Amino acid sequence: MPNSKESIEYVIPVQYRKMENLHIVFWLFKDIAWCLGIPLLGITMIIPTLIISIVISWRTRKLMSELCHNLAITFWISANSFWMVTEFFHIDTQIAFLGITYKHLAMFPFGIGVVILAFYYLIWKPRHKNEAETM
């Protein structure tokens, strides 16, 4: 007989799944535009990609495992988008301050995402072993 943790189902409503799938489309167009050097499309795609990521994070806020992973994705998209913009405007290799380039400033949101996941795996999850999770 499965314990209560094994029998819990995480169900995503169809409208949420459709939004998540559309999010992937926007994200791919953003990165394709970056790869092909099409600034207008790449920068334009930041807006729906980031907005949907924030909405997904909000909708999953009641499950800490989902919230932390979705927030990490939101910060990843932010960092990735900032890096892309610095390349489009040819300032990625310029020094922002103290020998740090503009591209390397993307490490701040990347780092925030890592900190969120570290919090989840090292602090939250070990202290909440009996709570429902998806990861």
Image: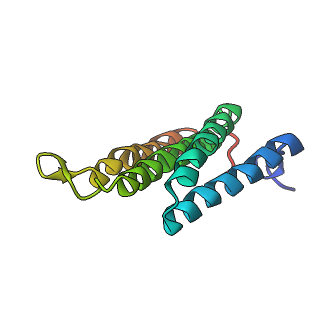
Q: Residue furthest left?
A: 98
Image coordinates of residue 116 in percent, x first then y, are 46, 42
In this rendering, is residue 91 above or below 50? below
Q: Residue furthest bottom?
A: 36
Q: Work out whether residue 88 or residue 5 is closer to the camera in this orientation and state it.
A: 88
Image coordinates of residue 3 in percent, x first then y, are 79, 50
Q: Residue at x 43, y 55 (%)?
A: 84
Image coordinates of residue 23 in percent, x first then y, are 69, 49
Left or right placement of residue 56 versus residue 87 in this view? right
The part of the image, by quadrant, that contains residue 94 is: bottom left
Q: Work out whether residue 45 or residue 13 is closer to the camera in this orientation and state it.
A: 45
Looking at the image, can residue 4 be seen? no
Q: Residue at x 41, y 50 (%)?
A: 85
Left or right placement of residue 58 versus residue 106 in this view? right
Which quadrant of the figure contains the N terminus? bottom right
Looking at the image, can residue 3 be seen? yes
Image coordinates of residue 45 in percent, x first then y, are 60, 48
Identify the coloring. rainbow
Q: Residue at x 36, y 48 (%)?
A: 111
The image shows a total of numbered marks equal to 0
